[in-house]
Amino acid sequence: MAAASAAPLLQGADHPKRITIAMGSAGERVFKLGDQEVVLMGGNYVIKGPPYFPPKEVVSADALEMSQGAEQMLYKPPPAADGSARCVKPCVRLGCLWEGSMPDKAGPIDPTWAANLETTIKAFAEQNVYVFLELHDDAFTTTNGGEGLPWWTGAYMQETAHAHSTSGHCCCFTKPSYITKPGRWICWMLMGSSP
């Protein structure tokens, strides 16, 4: 079996409880905590509008329920390739919305949002729930009926479509189109270049 990756998947690089990803003997991805293979189980945790993260008491109660649920469940994962037991580690995919972190194009990161993110992660950590941070967006921005990216990114693209397109349509197409990978286009538009 391949050695664990040098870059941590979860937690800081020097954290003793970091989870890494390695390649298994059959080429599959294997999550490891130290030398032990583990199974990650959990769910999504996303608030798609202000305040973007619930109060610490709510997160702590949810984290405790997740942790206890992982300990009490009847499911037993299949053994590791070497026959050793694999335990379940609770985890959560924590949605982070750019619109919450940077509501103003001029920046900087909103300090209240950043403090709430840190408080939320610490509340999960106190109950041994691992956190995946996910840059969350559904249907791009509020200008498109969704959420995730700040409204000003969509407004900027709409305002500058002529500057970036001979046809006058967004993203240089000859007829109106739908953006399927908005993050890539936003970066190019904000940098003043094109793909």
Image (cartoon, rainbow, N blue to C red):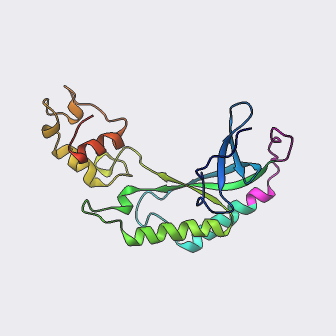
Q: Quadrant of residue 89?
A: bottom right
Above/below status of 114 relative to 155 = below
Count of marks overlaid on the render? 0
Q: Residue at x 79, y 53 (%)?
A: 73
Residue 114 vs residue 17: left or right? Answer: left
Region of the chain picked out in magenta, as a range: 69-85
Position of residue 90 measured from the top left corner of the image (x, y, whole percent): 69, 56
Identify which residue, 102 or 80, lies in the foreground: 80
Position of residue 93 measured from the top left corner of the image (x, y, whole percent): 56, 53
Q: Quadrant of the C terminus?
A: top left
Q: Residue at x 71, y 49 (%)?
A: 32
Is 82 a magenta residue?
A: yes
Residue 143 vs residue 122: left or right? Answer: left
Q: Residue at x 44, y 57 (%)?
A: 48
Above/below status of 40 relative to 174 = below
Residue 125 vs residue 34: left or right? Answer: left
Q: Is residue 55 visible?
A: yes
